[in-house]
Amino acid sequence: MKVGAVKISECSSLLFIGDSITDCEREWTGDKNGGLGNGYVSMVAAKFANSWPPVSLRILNTGVSGNEVTDLEERWDKDVLAHQPDCLSVMIGINDAWQQFDCAMEPKEVAMANFGATYRSLLERTVPQLKGLILMTPYLIEANREDGMRRMMDGYGEVVKRLAGEFGAVLVDVQAAFDEYLETGSSQSLAEDRVHPNGAGHEIIARAFLAAVR
């Protein structure tokens, strides 16, 4: 089953779920940003509100730092389905790839296949109630594509791209957005650990998201 083109103007709610990049201290900011955190989610919400005509929809953030796709599976009912969003945005895979690179407990090919199977199962359960689905690739802010961690992340990104095609989702290629920046800029100017971006890095993610759903 495919969702089809995302029409944000027809949605009443948009839920973002993912790991620390989505979370971005949302539980620490309290009412400051409406529980949206300090990252790309709050930036997207601000741009929607300040657009003309303004985009009026309820935006939710249920990202949790450190999450892998199996963590999403455990909390999917509570943190996605219970909210009954019209549109859903998912960004997951960074920690799945990171763990495989640092301390793999199973063959890398098996781990990647299990990632895709779990991700697909979650989407199959959810697509029937959605008007729009957005899948965001995991990324590493690293220009050297032969870097071991970068190769691993690209593999997980390819899984997400295939799922986006399978479900007719809008794809936000976050890795490509960072790669464009890295043609002239440095990784350290965006993130000390190549993963957790500063404000400028989150702005790149937000712009990539907005360009994809425009």
Image: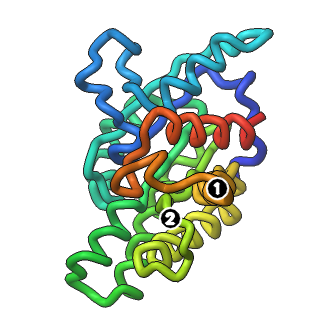
**Closer to the camera, 17 or 3?**
17
- What amino acid does circle 1 point to? Asp
Residue 208 image offset from top left, x and y in percent: 66, 43
Q: How many discs appear?
A: 2
Q: Residue at x 27, y 70 (%)?
A: 99
Quarter of the rendering containing residue 212: top right
Label 2: which residue? Answer: 142
Mark 2: few, some, or many residues within 10 Å (few <14, many ≥20)? Answer: many
Per the model, the C-alpha gap separating discs 1 and 2 is: 15 Å
Q: Is residue 122 above or below residue 6?
A: below
Q: Locate residue 37: give its quadrant.
A: top left
Residue 56 is situated, as x and y percent measured from the top left of the image, at 65, 12
- The type of residue carrying mark 2 is Glu
Q: Is residue 89 above or below residue 44?
A: below
Taking the spot 64% from the left edge, 50% from the top edge, the residue there is 172
Q: Secondary structure at mark 1?
A: loop
Quadrant that contains the N terminus: bottom right
The residue at the point 39 percent across, 14 percent down is: 34
What residue is disc 1 on? 173
Classify 10 Å Cα crowding around label 1: few (below 14), some (14-19), many (20 and above).
many
| Vertical arrangement, residue 154 with respect to residue 34, above or below | below
Q: Quadrant of residue 62?
A: top left
Q: Nearer the viewer, residue 140 or 94?
A: 140
Q: Residue at x 41, y 23 (%)?
A: 36
Q: Is residue 123 left or right of residue 10?
A: left
